[in-house]
Amino acid sequence: MTTYDPVSLGILWDRLISITDEIVSTLIRTSFSINVRESYDLSCVLFDASGNPIAQGSYSVPSFTGTSGPTIAHMFKKYPADSLREGDVIATNDPWMGTGHLYDISVMRPVFHRGRRVGFTMSITHLPDVGGAGNSAGPSEIYEEGLRLPVCKLMNAGQLNTELLDIIRTNVRVNEQVIGDIMANISCNEVGGRLLSEFMDEYGIDDLTALSQAIRDQSERVIREKIAEIPDGRYTNQIQIEGIDQPITLACEIVKRGQSIAIDFSGTGGCVRAAINVPFCYTRAWAAYSIKCLTCPETPNNEGQIRPIAVTAPDDCILNAQPPWPTAGRHSVGHFVVPLIFGALAEAVPNVVQADPGMMNIFNVQGRHRDGRDIASLFFLAGGFGAHDGLDGTPTTPAPSNMGVVPTEVWENLTSMSVIKRELLADSGGAGKFRGGVGQEVVLRNDTGHPLTVSFMGLRTQFAAAGFHGGKAGGLRRYTINDKEAHPKGRYVLAPGDTVVIHEAGGGGFGDPRGRDRQALIDDVRKGIVSRAGAQRDFGVEISDEELDAR
Amino acid sequence: MASNGGTITPDIARRFPVRILESGPAAGALMSALLGRRLGIPNLLSFDMGGTTAKGCLIRGMEPLKKYTFEVARMHEFKAGSGLPVRIPVIDMIEIGAGGGSIAEVDARNVIRVGPRSAGADPGPACYGQGGTRPTLTDADLVLGYLDGGFFLGGKMRLDRAAAEHALGGEIGRVLDIDAARAAWGTHEIINEDVARAFRVHASERGFDYRGCTMIAFGGAGPVHALRIARKLKIPRVVLPVGAGVMSALGLLASPLSFEIVRSNVVLVNDLDRAGFIARFAPIAEDAQSYLLNAGVAKQDIRLIHRLDMRYYGQGYDLEIVLPEGELGELFDQLPKLFAQSYEQIFGMSFLTQALEIVNWKTEARGPFPKMREGQGPGGASAAKRSALKGRRTAYFPEAGGYRDCPVYDRYALSPDDHIEGPAFIEENESTCVVGVGDKVAVDRYFNLVAEILAQGDGQ
């Protein structure tokens, strides 16, 4: 088998990543929904001929890194790799085969080079709608959530499956956006195939197997060496997060031995009759991502990095939900896997863990635009980032996922709602030697002239982002409608003129607040991130007029 | 000089100082466009590489591509998104943090990474002997034999090859268990890949098919890398202009007075008719034109160029459509066809039934191109009588199996119709052209070097 020295390996590896970046770029340019083009709720992955992920676009949602391998394996169960022909395009949005909820469609295409199947490309995007109840925590069974596509062929040897597209078009809201996004997925994979084939021509490579092996082995070696640096031991953590009516317990036990890590979620509470249950594929992906962040955050993503990490969860706990539990808002529980694991390892690797983040906030809006067209879209907001040892948390930065927040101008155009205010919330970041990122006050008004349904899936409204190593917790998230408190996972119909006020949660601080650098705190007060009263209350520091004026 | 590559009067510059941001890098792009006009090549890649950054630009139909928003003051490793957005018309430059001073290191994956950190000019590369100890691209090019330690800047500065070998062999070679030459090759080739990738992504986002185009390369490190980058991009021909520094200044002088105005007005094409279409352009055109009239350009010499940013209704990214010359009303009827053609060229498919939306309306008023006389050779009349072959040195080419003996030519002694076959080097004071195995270089009547690139798979 061909071997690659570090010089060739580096060059070829970077080129494969560059190909996935071009797939992402094509996808974004041709998409019709803001989920893709503003929020980057997507991922593009390149696989070898056996279906091992070897490269991923630099702009990708972390959870999809870990799900794409199992997804393609599910696709092969129905359509074995050997049966696929040039021009075939396979897709599914099944939560248990894809990414944990119906909204993400995974679209895969085999790549042929000189008549031989040499690999696959896959793009995954969050569709603006899949019919059913619409994206909300409301449903109590998957059947209410919308259209579930088993593994199916979107294209057969170059022929579009128009019947399937018709079924989708008939079942969803904003169907021009949904179909437009599906077509964008098809076309970006076509571009990906062409680029991969050109790459193989250029370097005279007939078969990616050896290169794939080298990339994955190298990645595995790097992560194993870093895992070895974590002290051996058994680490546990248990946290409470908000459910619908009562809190949910998430628990983990991490056993680190030598160059391997095993993570088990025994002790975690059961599924609930609301769409916040998490299929295991999603749990596993976030668990692997947590370890990657703590060990080798800079290395590119591929299958090799997942190998040393074993993840298990008992059947039917909320982190291993089985059909027909509903899952649309699985992120509102699943995202907590990361702070759960960071918390468990906070003593073992204090210099790299992140204090709890304020996390992202996604809510769904359905109704009618002032100009009459349908609206069905997600609005992405973010709480403050958790602090690290040596690093303050940035304001309104999503974690652990990395979607972009929706710009005001884009949202107003898309929905005809007005964004009255977006203002950083003073004192919402957890105090600490390194301060948690602040949240934000966002005020929205229904100026569509029609009733508008909003479905919240809010987190951190009862359990704040905890600080680490003596740092304080961040501020809580809050929703009010016309000055009345609203349920963080409620579904409301806004009358024209109704106003929603959202307070985004702050991130947790790191280290004892009394240890904060005085000048840094003065800067915080000057910028309005910490108030003078807050400086005194949370940091125990009185700041004088002279200090504030001094430049 | 304005950032969009047009000339503006001092008065306009005082009123709109933002319009001269980034006008410096525009010079190289304009030189390439000028050269394109002179050589009759409409589509070009302009590539400039110096000590700290490499810059590229795409030229379509003899004009540099433009954009209408860019970032200044990037805070994080040149990364997009870490700077401040500025919304003015500018030449659409690719900027890559790669130059002679870029530092090579072993990254977290245990492979070589070059840049974005740079040793700059001080302390500079290890071979400068000014206290720099970390290996840089210039060190790699020296170890490979692509630069002559005794003829850097025309011999004004000596380079220390042993120091370069020591830096590469230590920091890279020892960690990866390879020799200094292989470490140097890796460093050199990674930069080539990075530049090629930047061009590829930039071009694909703009729907520019670079394969088959010509590249114009200049700057201190440009000619060292250009031919190999061209091969990666399947570009058959590279032109290395004579006296690139002077040519850039000429590029500035050769650009016409121009002023462009962009107005946002989002409207569905279906909601417009011919009259409405013409009416929306009229005030924009009048405004743009007024600046040139005030600057003393005669009305009959002003050309108006109309462009539209359009998209399918529902999309978030638009595509710029340059309206061909003609009556605006007739062009309005052709909009769906013009858009579909551009869209399909870039994304491989188009939707005929989807409604079209116009987002931005742009009009550029442009004066006449200044008349230029044709250039002379760089060395004067006596130069051609000297022997062009000035010596030989060994250099590393993977296709040749490692180091091999190569001829070195003096660019100032070359005359039109001279031919050189690679591997070889052509030296001038500011740079060295590295001619790879199988590449062929000819000198044209303007004394430009024109390289024909061997089309085949890369060696490892």
Image (cartoon, coloured by chain):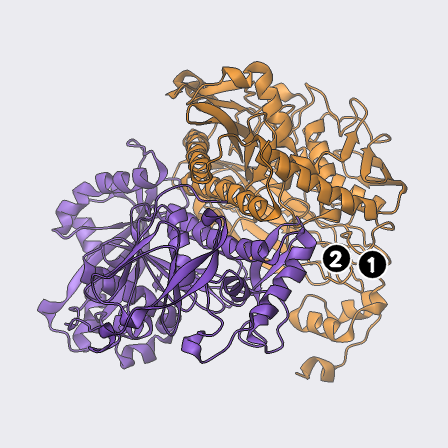
> Mark 2 highlights which residue?
A387
Secondary structure at numbered mark 1 = loop
The residue positioned farthest toward the left in the image shown: B300
Crowdedness of circle 2 by 10 Å Cα count: few (<14), some, many (20+)? Answer: many
> Mark 1 highlights which residue?
A471
Foreground: A227 or B408? B408
Q: Chain of mark 1?
A: A
The answer to whether residue B284 of the structure is visible from this angle is: no
The answer to whether the residue labelled 2 contacts the one labelled 1, judged by CB atoms less than 8 Å apart, is yes
For badge 1, the amino acid type reads Gly
Residue at 80% x, 56% y: name it: A351
Which sits earlier in the primary sequence, circle 2 or circle 1?
A: 2
For chain B, the rendered hue is: purple
Foreground: B339 or B35? B35
Foreground: B385 or A99? B385
For badge 2, the amino acid type reads Ala
Residue B273 in picture, x, y percent from top left: 19, 44
Task: Tell me, by letter, which chain the rendering colours orange.
Answer: A
